[in-house]
Amino acid sequence: MFTVSIWAQAQLEACESLKEKRSIVRSMLAEFRRIYKASAAEVGTQDQPHTMTLGLALVASDMVSAQRMGQMIEQALYMDTRFPTMDVKVQIHKQG
């Protein structure tokens, strides 16, 4: 079994308030949960309206599946046009 952990941070230049930021973050997290069946949460910078920090995690039965899922999520994050600046880190860990 393999676990995939993803950390992502983006600049939200268009957000004027925390309420607006939370709306974007909530919809994005729901999308990752629905599409990729990943656990997802805002893991930092909650009090900064112009920065979003997300953590995602999922489990795969083999290394190929883990790499593929990590790459798919990483690509989805980088291709989201709402975030001109995105930093993503993907880690895969073998369990047991």
Image (cartoon, helix red, strand yellow):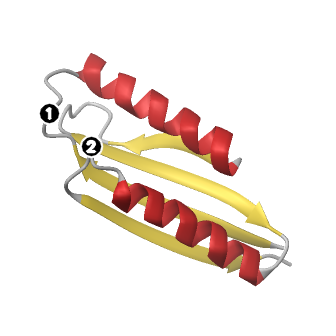
Q: Callout 2: 10 Å neighbours few (<14), some, many (20+)?
A: some
Quadrant where the N terminus lies? bottom right
Q: Which residue is mark 2?
A: 82
Residue type at mark 1 is: Ala
Q: Secondary structure at mark 1?
A: loop
Question: What residue is shown at x 64% (from left), y 41% (from top)?
Answer: 33
Q: Residue furthest top?
A: 19
As drawn, 61 above or below 47: below
Question: What residue is shown at x 36% (from left), y 58% (from top)?
Answer: 79
As drawn, 11 above or below 72: above
Question: What residue is shown at x 71% (from left), y 68% (from top)?
Answer: 3
Front residue (pair 13, 52) = 13
Marks 1 and 2 close (CB-CB < 8 Å): yes
As drawn, 44 above or below 94: above
Q: Position of residue 30 (x, y in %)?
A: 57, 33
Q: Position of residue 58 (x, y in %)?
A: 69, 58
The answer to whether any part of residue 95 appears in the image is yes
Q: Which residue is mark 1?
A: 14
The answer to whether any part of residue 38 appears in the image is no
Quadrant where the C terminus lies? bottom right
Front residue (pair 71, 47) = 71
Question: What residue is shown at x 66% (from left), y 51% (from top)?
Answer: 36
Q: Quadrant of residue 13?
A: top left
Q: Quadrant of residue 57?
A: bottom right
Residue type at mark 2 is: Arg
Q: Secondary structure at mark 2?
A: loop
Relative to residue 5, is residue 20 drawn left or right?
left
